[in-house]
Image (cartoon, rainbow, N blue to C red):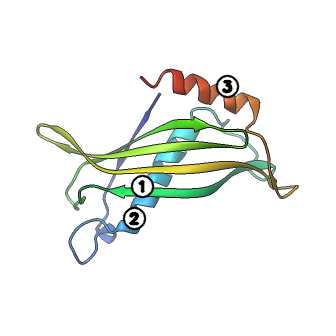
């Protein structure tokens, strides 16, 4: 199942070329990632005990995004490993005809025990929730 996160393009997101600066897309993906994670991580989760470390980000730029654009990011889980899972992103700009794919991305999220200082297996409850979400992503 994909989450859809509306993004407000801010004036300070724009660079000298009059479009969203390439580094800003990672903050858009971060906002979308948190929306996705809220589907299966409890609201009162103790992040000081164990949580996630962002191990890798990839961004593919297809079309520029401008200040007046109406933007939405779709996020989904594209892979679950032993200690990590991948989140994929598709950033769209809404148009009168529908929407245009402007940017795609992927993040590798590693489960991490902060008390021990080491990576851990994806918790079983998270693994089951991610599997369910992936099944519903048709």
Q: Residue 128 carries which label?
A: 3
- On the rendered structure, is 55 left or right of 112? left
Q: How crowded is the residue under tag 2: few (<14 C-alpha within 10 Å), some, or many (20+)?
A: some
- Residue 64 horizontal side relative to residue 8, left or right: left
| Mark positioned earlier in the residue sequence (2 or 3) | 2
Q: In which quarter of the image is the C terminus?
A: top left
Residue at the far right in the pictured view = 116
- Tag shown at residue 24: 2
Q: Residue at 67% x, 38% y: name it.
A: 81
Q: Name the residue under label 1.
A: 28
Q: Nearer the viewer, residue 88 or 42?
A: 88
Real-space CA distance between mark 1 and mark 2, rounded to the nearest whole angstrom: 7 Å
Does 134 appear above or below 34? above
Q: In front here: 121 or 45?
A: 121
Residue at 81 percent across and 49 percent down: it is 49
Q: Quadrant of residue 137?
A: top left
Q: Is 70 placed above or below 22 here?
A: above
């Amino acid at each position: 199942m994909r989450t859809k996160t509306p993004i407000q393009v801010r004036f300070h997101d724009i660079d000298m070329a009059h479009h969203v600066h390439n580094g800003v897309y990672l903050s858009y993906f971060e906002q979308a990632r948190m929306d996705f994670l809220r589907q299966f991580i409890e609201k009162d989760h103790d992040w000081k005990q164990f949580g996630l470390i962002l191990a890798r980000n990839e961004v593919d730029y297809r079309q520029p995004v401008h200040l007046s654009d109406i933007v939405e990011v779709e996020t989904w889980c594209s892979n679950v490993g032993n200690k990590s899972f991948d989140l994929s992103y598709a950033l769209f700009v809404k148009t009168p005809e529908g929407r245009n794919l402007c940017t795609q991305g992927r993040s590798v999220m590693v489960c991490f025990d902060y008390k021990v200082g080491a990576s851990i297996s994806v918790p079983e409850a998270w693994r089951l929730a991610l599997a369910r979400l992936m099944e519903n992503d048709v």
